[in-house]
Amino acid sequence: MPGAKNSVLKLMAATLLAPGTSTLTNVPDIEDVTIMSELLRRLGCVVAHAGSSITIEVPERPDHRADYDLVRKMRASICVLGPLIARCGAADVAVPGGDNIGSRGLDMHVEGLRKMGVHVDNEHGYLLAECEALTGASVFLDFPSVGATETILMAAVTARGQSVIENAAREPEIIDICSMLVSMGADISGIGSSSLVINGVSDLKPTKHRVVSDRIVAGTWAVAAVMTQGDITIHGVPHEHLALPLEKLELTGARIEREGASIRIQMQGRPQCVDVVTLPYPGFPTDLQPQFIALNAMGLGAALVTENLFEARFRFVQELARLGADVRTDGHHALIRGRESLSGAPVEATDIRAGAGLVLAGLVANGSTTVYGVTHIDRGYAGFVETLQGLGAQIQRVDD
């Protein structure tokens, strides 16, 4: 299983904390890695790709400005904010773009940095941050935001004194970045818990690190197996990272075998619809919500899907309805009544996971389905079409 999109981009940013050459392995071949590579080059780094590995040579004094033309393409580019402040004492980072799935404010990032002595302004679409010396602080996050946890963590590892992040995110990707930072010389305790304690060190050193497997990609293939009544085995991903989604798939009627870092999914017959409520890890991941809505659209019975993280994530159900899905939304709830069959139609991907969900629906719809906007899918899935072809899907990519 390739490395996680939601981890590798942050790990690439973290290399800025140490001058010299760091190496990342198990790097997915996705568009967002290409964008982040170019962003690092503009900051003065030398980035080289070799298969599934990347080497990043960080200069003694990186540039500290992340321009809009790149940042607008990928929200994760905000993750350079913490490292640049730590290394340069300043950062000018354009307010990011990325998927159009709702408001994802930077208030917690900014408030945490301000507690550490950073002066932050928002001018002409840029966050302008500067600091004479980062000082450890106690930060309580109103919500266990992955991005805010990462920003504050990367700023804190070389700050003076001790920092504590309470109500920190606990995702496997957070554990991954903590593990890499520790290998660089950071002093972090409480890894995997909601309370991270960071004792600042004077400097960090380059490292070599393997990116954690992508649980969302693995979950997407698992849903695809259930929807198509398939039998697949996914290798190289800890099943614990998908504990709740796998339990939900078992409720649909699937048989799931868990052994080490392998997961086998077997399905016979039409799946039962299943309720889903998205929550921060270890709750149900919002990045698998569209795929489960697609599953429910062709399942037996009805299900209620509740989205608690991104208010605009239901935008894609309008496209799913073009395939004949019966979905009604009300605020952050979606009621799906399963239909015996869906009907192929042209649809438009609105974000990475919505695009994946529409493709899965197209696999089981009668007739031909054309999914436009697949550049969204490229941002999060390596070899998406090729993997599905290898599993027996009748799918091809065409230039428009």
Image (cartoon, grey):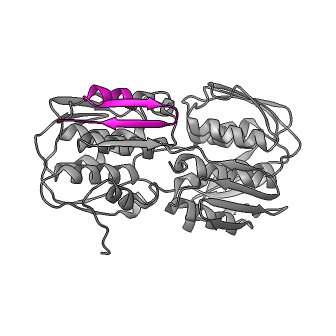
- Name above or below for residue 241 compared with residue 19: above
Residue 33 in which image quadrant:
bottom right
Residue 253 in which image quadrant:
top left
Q: Residue 185, how many percent across, how many down?
A: 82, 41
132 with respect to 192 (left or right): right
253 in the magenta segment: yes
In this view, the residue in front, 287 or 390, is: 390
Q: Which residues are magenta?
A: 246-269
Q: Residue at x 22, y 29 (%)?
A: 303
- Name above or below for residue 252 compared with residue 231: above
Residue 385 appears in view: yes
In this view, the residue in front, 151 or 269, is: 269
379 with respect to 20 (left or right): left
Q: Which quadrant, please, contains the C terminus?
A: bottom left
Residue 130 appears in view: no
Q: Residue 346, how many percent across, how many down?
A: 20, 62
Q: Residue at x 74, y 42 (%)?
A: 181
- Name above or below for residue 294 compared with residue 390: above
How many labels were placed on the picture? 0
Q: Residue 182, how many percent across, how many down?
A: 76, 38
- Name above or below for residue 378 compared with residue 245: below
47 with respect to 362 (left or right): right
Q: Residue furthest right?
A: 202
222 in the magenta segment: no
Residue 161 in which image quadrant:
top right
Q: Residue at x 30, y 38 (%)?
A: 292
Q: Residue 64, how many percent across, how many down?
A: 73, 60
In this view, the residue in front, 315 or 343, is: 343
